[in-house]
Image (spheres, rainbow, N blue to C red):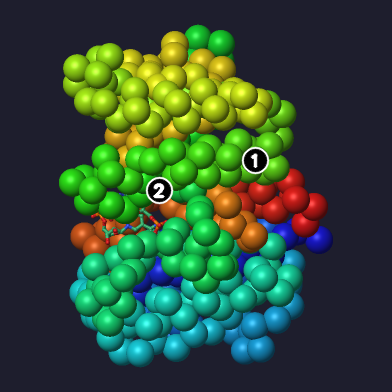
Amino acid sequence: MAPVLALTTGEPAGIGPELALMLVASRVPLAGRVVAIGDPDLLAQRARRLGLDIELPVLARRDEVPAQRPGVLPVWPVTLRAPATAGMLDAANAGYVLETLDVAIAACRDGRAQAMVTAPLHKGVIIEGGHPDFTGHTEYLRDACGVEDVVMMLATRLATPSGDQALRVALASVHLPLREVADAITDAGLTRVLRILDGDLKRYFAVAAPRIAVCGLNPHAGENGHLGREELEVIIPTLERLRCEGLRLDGPLPADTLFTPRHLDGIDAVLAMYHDQGLPVLKYAGFGRAANITLGLPIVRTSVDHGTALDLAGTGRADIGSLGVALEVAAEMARAVGH
Ligand SMILES: NC(=O)c1ccc[n+]([C@@H]2O[C@H](COP(=O)([O-])OP(=O)(O)OC[C@H]3O[C@@H](n4cnc5c(N)ncnc54)[C@H](O)[C@@H]3O)[C@@H](O)[C@H]2O)c1
Ligand SMILES: N[C@H](C(=O)O)[C@H](O)COP(=O)(O)O
């Protein structure tokens, strides 16, 4: 049977609900048995608003998901806390958004689903809704699954001199103010991130001996200590030690020239030191054709490469491309671990 992909529909005022509907309405074959997690009335209202003729059977017991049928989107129901209006955030629905995640996590953990795929949520409104420590799905999943560390990795495709290949960018630090980044780059942290990245490239993506290129933190990878000392004091010694364990690591390399097709040729993943060192490059290369993947979890989780796009919510103009990729990657990962 095709894997069950539990799709959380995200911030109810954002584009998540309509992306799920538009994807089903597009009638492209889906990568697995997709079940939407969200408020059935919200989905029905949004479908009417967009003139989409979608059948939304509610699976009240949140159990067996039938084989995918064109124009049909089964729903595991979660009830909104307050009415949702496209484009208008309401902190009252923070608990609703988190409940959709909890439903998906539980289903992945007890085997009713083989992967979870998340439509975008709005971090700020979750925080304002009474969850001051919330920083994103990635960290929420880490805590919910009881693991020490996870790694955010985004992936798309890239043309290099040797041909088409994956462009995967993982992050050594994630949702952190820039002011705090340098202190977060430690030997212990880099070691954990690189071991997870190396292990999960093998486990989920059939890369036998991953070749990972590691960015420096500072301009020109520190220019031999003249533009910052983190490379000399932390990154180089960590990479040397991990090479002795057998990891294939290049770097630390200057990020500006590493992110060019010639240097990326044959590289299985890049480790960027912080969010906006790596993700703008990835999104420039493949926005709308990329997936966000959380590594290091006991379950499979992917997501879209974009946010809630409140400016587009309710218009039907949002691009469904990334959601399609996120579902495909989730199914590929689920199959790789035998589902
Ligand atoms: N996976 C996630 O849950 C996720 C990912 C990224 C950002 N976010 C959150 O989303 C919120 C808004 O973030 P932002 O404004 O930085 O980014 P955003 O991606 O929501 O919007 C940035 C721009 O990209 C456009 N855009 C986004 N998705 C699009 C799509 N599918 N098709 C066409 N255009 C699209 C928007 O219209 C906007 O112009 C923030 O709270 C952020 O943290 C969540
Ligand atoms: N950093 C992600 C991006 O820019 O696409 C995004 O904020 C999503 O993060 P979570 O998956 O942790 O919510």
Q: Is residue 335 above or below residue 160?
A: below
Mark 1 Cα within 10 Å, few/some/many (few <14, many 20+)?
A: some
329 left or right of 97 in image = right
**Residue at position x 28%, y 82% in the image:** 130
Disc ID at residue 305: 2
Q: Is residue 40 above or below residue 110?
A: below
- Where disc 1 sits, the SS reads helix
Q: Nearer the viewer, residue 134 or 314?
A: 134
Q: For residue 283, what is the image quadrant?
A: top left
1 left or right of 31 in image = right
Across and down, in percent, residue 238 comes to 47, 30
Q: Nearer the viewer, residue 93 or 225?
A: 225
* Ligand 2 neighbours mark 2 (CB distance < 8 Å): yes
Residue 125 in view, yes or no = yes
Q: Is residue 269 above or below residue 13?
A: above
Question: Label 1 near label 2: C-beta < 8 Å?
Answer: no
Which mark is first along the chain, 1 or 2?
A: 1
Across and down, in percent, residue 84 comes to 30, 81
Hey, what amino acid is under mark 2? Asp
Q: How many marks?
A: 2
Between circles 2 and 1, the one closer to the viewer is 1
Disc ID at residue 199: 1
Q: Quadrant of the C terminus?
A: bottom right
Q: Quadrant of the N terminus?
A: bottom right
Disc ID at residue 332: none
Across and down, in percent, residue 172 comes to 41, 41
- Where disc 2 sits, the SS reads loop
Q: Nearer the viewer, residue 47 or 82?
A: 82
Hey, what amino acid is under mark 1? Gly
**Residue at position x 58%, y 40% in the image:** 195
**Residue at position x 28%, y 52% in the image:** 176
**Residue at position x 49%, y 48% in the image:** 151
